[in-house]
Image: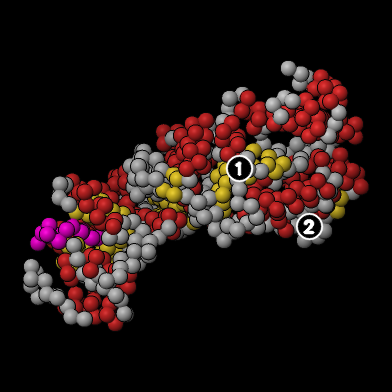
Amino acid sequence: MAIDLDTSTGTIPNYIQESWKRCQSKGIDPATIDKEHILGEYELTEYYEQYEELLYYSSPILEDVYHSIHGTEFLLLIATPEGYILDTLGEPSFLQQAENASLRKGANWLEESKGTNAIGTAIVEKKPILVHGHQHFFQDNHFLACAATPILDPDGQLLGILNLSSHQQNYHPFALSLVKRTAHSIEQALLLAHTQNQTKKLTKDLDFIYDHHPSSLITINKEGKITRLNFAAARTIGCSEQSTIGEPISSIISGLDPFTLTAAQEQKFSFKNQVFTTHILISDNHDQSCVILQGETQKQKGELTNRYHFTDIISNDPDMNETISIAKKVATLDISLLISGETGTGKELFAQSIHGASLRSDKPFIAINCSAIPEGLLESELFGYEKGAFTGAKSQGQAGKFEAADGGTLFLDEIGDMPLTAQVTLLRVLQERYITRIGGITPRPIDVRIIAATHKDLQKEIEAGRFRADLYFRLNGFTLKLPPLRNRTDLLLLAEHILSRLPFKKEKTELTEDAKAFITEYEWPGNFRQLENVLQQAAFLANHNRITKSLLLSLCPSSTAPIKEEQKREQKLMSLREHEIALIKQVLEQTDGNISLASKQLNIGRTTLYRKLKAYNLMS
């Protein structure tokens, strides 16, 4: 295939000719462009995290360039060394045409995907590249003029590619110079940040870092007292800067030895969901800051897949076994599911097991506790946000839980505690199967299975006006009710299982007969979680590896006594009564109050139904 000359730029540069040869040798068809090689939202989010520093420091510089050449049809973008576009900025009039040519976030522009182009060829050549009009290998890209240059990290390694694209008729001879100067500014910003993170200067020299660094930063002096922290750190530890300055770091992060921190470089420790690394700045006899603790968010691998399966559910109780059997059947149905049960009954255990047995088992399992996130942040956690959506937002924006769970399962724990405003947005998402990030305007399609869980009676919450009825019916494709521990007949089996898996006990721990009786009679208000906690403590404190009733009693709340058999029977009767009332209400609603039809569906006589209506105070 011959290479045409571009008369507007003179002879074809050698790097263009070499690129065309590479494309031809790989059998790439210049008439068929690859527009399918685009990252999904979850994959794109991983690249955002990997190149967070590049995006953070390049964003304000690109904004300045954008404002300086505003009014011309152009597109500025950042791409990874792997060829994926991470960030774009340009004129709306040109953005649509660029997207039609796959010049958009997530698209891959290596030569293998898009032939000769400024991004892919700059990656190969590792130098500034200009590709004009017909110099593009693919015919669909001939309308473009693109200038690209590598961005190098402080160690000289390729960190990314900066590209400027426009219509070929709008090509300006200074385009490549502009790209090179802009990339140099980004490299200087990265070098400055790198240098300041490693420097041994005093607090004054840290101003730039503390004002602009996205990570949590805490500075302590040689006595272990906090002398400074930035906004990200204050949010992580849950304290304001004013209330924290001068306090020992050990009072904020329990068990942390400040003298150990000041002794060695690059130490690591975990706090909440972050890993902090120590960076020693100075070590002299003056009472000045000497260590920076820099926090980075940990990869929460456990929330990206299910850790539990049905084989992890220990049960020899008939009611629980029936619940497990129903859950296994429901797992194969791709419908929304509502799991109800008291705290500690294993709602997330069931949710993960259902995901693992579903057709979505190879996709992410994402969990979010609706009661643990402040109301103002819940929607951004669920739906994500665009850059600049609010103060403290990441410069490149962030995907929400819905996008992270795309293709898989989203577990909404404690759904009964979700604020009404968030319920409205959630209902719309479940109906339309699209999400829009906060601060954004572009709907994003999502495909997730919703499993919600609550310890509350949602019917009562609806009556009280705290939960939307339409959302309840949308979530309630099927309800799975988990029995409380006090109603189970296999408490001793659970207890023995817990004791057999204690990591700190090599010898077998035994339960005395009175301890076994206590376990079966006690009401366990905290359910399995409380049983596990009490037995772990008891095993640690037990003399001669024997757990007695008196030891268990000392570890349980004194106000909660074992339930007598009469009380258990009464609770069971009340449970049956509640079920019967609910069933009668449901049938009457379905038959529009027709007593004859209702009695036939309930398989009881009309007189019996009237008697029950009167006894249960259901007569209108």
Q: Is residue 466 above or below residue 518?
A: above
**Residue bearing mark 1:** 452
**Residue located 72% across and 24% down the image:** 593
Q: Using the numbered discs, state the Cα–Cα distance from disc 1 to disc 2 in whole angstroms.
A: 32 Å
Q: Nearer the viewer, mark 1 or mark 2?
A: 1
Q: Is residue 562 above or below residue 172?
A: above
Query: Is disc 1 surrounded by few (<14), some (14 to 19) or many (20+) residues within 10 Å?
Result: many
Toward the viewer: 475 or 159?
Answer: 475
Percent x, y for residue 507? Answer: 81, 60
Q: Is residue 171 magenta?
A: yes
**Residue located 76% across and 21% down the image:** 618
Query: What amino acid does circle 2 point to?
Result: Ser
Query: Is disc 2 surrounded by few (<14), some (14 to 19) or many (20+) residues within 10 Å?
Result: some
Magenta highlight range: 162-175
The image quadrant where one finds the C terminus is top right
Residue at the extreme right: 513
Percent x, y for residue 367? Answer: 56, 48
The image quadrant where one finds the N terminus is bottom left
Residue at the extreme front: 596
**Residue bearing mark 2:** 500
Quarter occupied by residue 150: bottom left
Left or right, 290 with reference to 169:
right
**Residue located 44% across and 41% down the image:** 380
Left or right, 460 with reference to 582:
left
Query: What amino acid does circle 1 point to?
Result: Ala
Q: Which mark is residue 437?
A: none
**Residue located 63% across and 28% down the image:** 461
